[in-house]
């Protein structure tokens, strides 16, 4: 789970000209102050920010030394990301100039490319990280996040300059105070990073051309492009005449289109602040090296999560109890209604659990007891039923051998010339309110189809 902050502050640059940037949820990142690290204004800002960091409201970000940080692209020989997660340290160990056990590492979320798992890995010696943190602590800025310069530069470039032509390769040149960082990519895809361990002003034209020639050649081969977009940023951009001289000395047979990022000196600090606020940057300060404020913040978040689970569990239990009580009341009411109905039907007290048995026994008895009343109340009677049935069976094609009509009961035996005639007879009887059951025993001695018709009045 990502850490959530109201703001993120990033500090970058040489001690005599540091840039303090701030990123908030609303609006873009901005420069708060640019002055010497020991100035009164910078000291006051650092103290104010430290209080916010201790309260868990803000993040304080720095950049790991570029010359001491290793960024490598790792490729596993299979497509399973789960399996690849177990071998990334082994693959990174081959790429490092120091044992991976002595390094603070970070692995980006892997993806599958051409049937193989791929990721970006970053590593820094723990002793170099500790020395860097001690230096920042002496400056009154104990950080909560320590990001990677090359990845932060590329993220800032992608955020500020959406590629109009994503097929054109990009070379981002960061002119730092004591080094130069070259970041290569295409569109929004990061390709590689190179660090030149010398101040920009110390490079002669020949040395600059010799150092950039293999970088540009490799980029041209990888991208198969004859045109590069070259972007410049860093405090060295502000040195008069430095960027034009380095541009003219760049050895590339194709076309180079040069642009300078706005707020070039604060470009890295602004990107660091954005990444820390969004929670998608690298942070070497994890595990045992996490800032105490971050540890407290995460502990409180876990406690709130536990309390949330506890409260949700209690609410579920209360809801279950309420549902159980409602269902129990509903069953009690239904039992009372059933017993009352049984008592009215049987005329005697109902026994709980035996209502159905009592009702089944009482129905035939009540039917027999009320038969005379039902017959007396029948306005039609057997005579009326006989008159209604007589036209149905008075057909020349039908011969009735036996006709029995009782209250609610009808039984007819006979023969017909065509068995299909019984379908018409059945429809007429059903229309008169009879439920029928027909049988065809076979042929009579005369060869006519026999039938047996049994009916029950639906009113009965």
Image: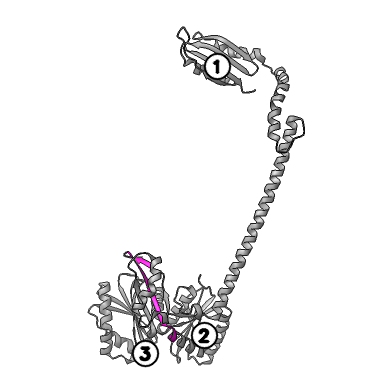
Q: Residue at x 55, y 12 (%)?
A: 413
Residue 396, x across and y down, in percent: 50, 8
Tell me the number on the disc at residue 243. none
Label 3, label 1: how many angstroms apart (C-alpha)?
A: 115 Å
Q: Residue at x 63, y 57 (%)?
A: 316
Tell me the number on the disc at residue 239. 3
Q: What residue does disc 2 label? A: 142
Residue 163, x across and y down, in percent: 35, 71
Q: Nearer the viewer, mark 1 or mark 2?
A: 1
Residue 106 location, quadrant: bottom left
| Res. 118 in view | yes
Q: Earlier in the sequence, mark 1 or mark 2?
A: 2
* Image-based side of 214 in relation to 435, left or right: left
Residue 369 location, quadrant: top right
Residue 67 versus residue 52: which sits nearer the camera? 67
Q: What residue does disc 1 label? A: 453
Q: Nearer the viewer, mark 3 or mark 1?
A: 1
* Image-based side of 399 in relation to 315, left or right: left
| Residue at the left extreme, as displayed | 253
* Image-based side of 405 in relation to 42, left or right: right
Q: Which residues are magenta?
A: 111-128
Q: Residue at x 61, y 65 (%)?
A: 308
Q: Which SS does the magenta portion mostly show? A: strand
Query: Judging from the image, what secondary structure is the residue with disc 2 in?
Result: loop
Residue 408, x across and y down, in percent: 64, 19
Magenta region includes residue 10: no
Magenta region includes residue 115: yes
Q: Is residue 410 above or below residue 309?
A: above
Query: Judging from the image, what secondary structure is the residue with disc 1 in?
Result: strand
Query: Judging from the image, what secondary structure is the residue with disc 3 in?
Result: loop
Residue 277, x across and y down, in percent: 49, 75
């Amino acid at each position: 789970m990502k850490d959530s902050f109201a703001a993120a502050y990033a500090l970058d640059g040489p001690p005599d000209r540091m840039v303090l940037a701030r990123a908030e949820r609303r609006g873009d990142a901005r420069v708060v102050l640019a002055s010497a690290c020991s100035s009164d204004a910078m000291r006051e800002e650092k103290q104010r920010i430290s209080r916010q960091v201790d309260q868990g409201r803000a993040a304080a970000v720095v950049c790991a030394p570029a010359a001491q940080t290793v960024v490598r692209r790792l490729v596993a020989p299979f497509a399973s990301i789960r399996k690849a997660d177990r071998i990334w340290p082994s693959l990174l160990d081959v790429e490092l100039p120091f044992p991976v056990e002595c390094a603070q590492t970070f692995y980006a979320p892997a993806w599958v490319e051409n049937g193989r798992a791929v990721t970006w890995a970053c590593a820094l010696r723990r002793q170099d990280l500790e020395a860097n943190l001690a230096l920042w602590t002496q400056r009154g800025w104990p950080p909560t996040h320590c990001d990677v310069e090359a990845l932060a530069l590329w993220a800032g470039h992608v955020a500020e300059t959406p590629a109009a032509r994503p097929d054109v390769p990009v070379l981002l040149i960061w002119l730092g105070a004591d080094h130069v960082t070259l970041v290569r990519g295409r569109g929004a895809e990061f390709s590689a990073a190179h660090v030149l361990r010398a101040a920009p002003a110390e490079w002669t034209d020949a040395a600059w051309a010799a150092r950039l020639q293999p970088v540009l050649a490799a980029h041209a081969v990888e991208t198969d492009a004859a045109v590069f977009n070259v972007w410049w940023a860093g405090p060295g951009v502000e040195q008069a005449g430095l960027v034009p001289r380095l541009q003219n000395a760049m050895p590339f047979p194709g076309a180079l289109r040069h642009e300078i990022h706005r707020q070039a000196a604060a470009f890295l600090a602004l990107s660091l602040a954005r990444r820390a606020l969004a929670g998608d940057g690298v942070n070497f300060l994890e595990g045992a090296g996490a800032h105490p404020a971050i540890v407290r913040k995460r502990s409180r978040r876990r406690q709130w999560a536990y309390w949330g689970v506890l409260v949700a569990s209690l609410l579920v239990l209360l809801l279950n109890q309420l549902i159980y009580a409602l269902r129990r009341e509903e069953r009690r009411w239904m039992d009372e209604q059933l017993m009352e109905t049984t008592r009215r039907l049987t005329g005697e007290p109902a026994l709980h659990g035996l209502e159905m048995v009592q009702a089944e026994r009482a129905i035939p008895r009540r039917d027999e007891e009320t038969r005379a009343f039902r017959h007396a109340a029948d306005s039609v009677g057997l005579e009326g039923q006989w008159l209604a049935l007589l036209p149905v069976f008075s057909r020349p094609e039908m011969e009735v051998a036996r006709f029995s009509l009782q209250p609610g009961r009808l039984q007819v035996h006979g023969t017909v010339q065509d068995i299909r005639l019984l379908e018409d007879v059945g429809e007429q009887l059903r229309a008169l309110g009879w439920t029928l059951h027909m049988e065809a025993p076979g042929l009579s001695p005369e060869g006519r189809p026999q039938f047996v018709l049994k009916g029950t009045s639906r009113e009965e």
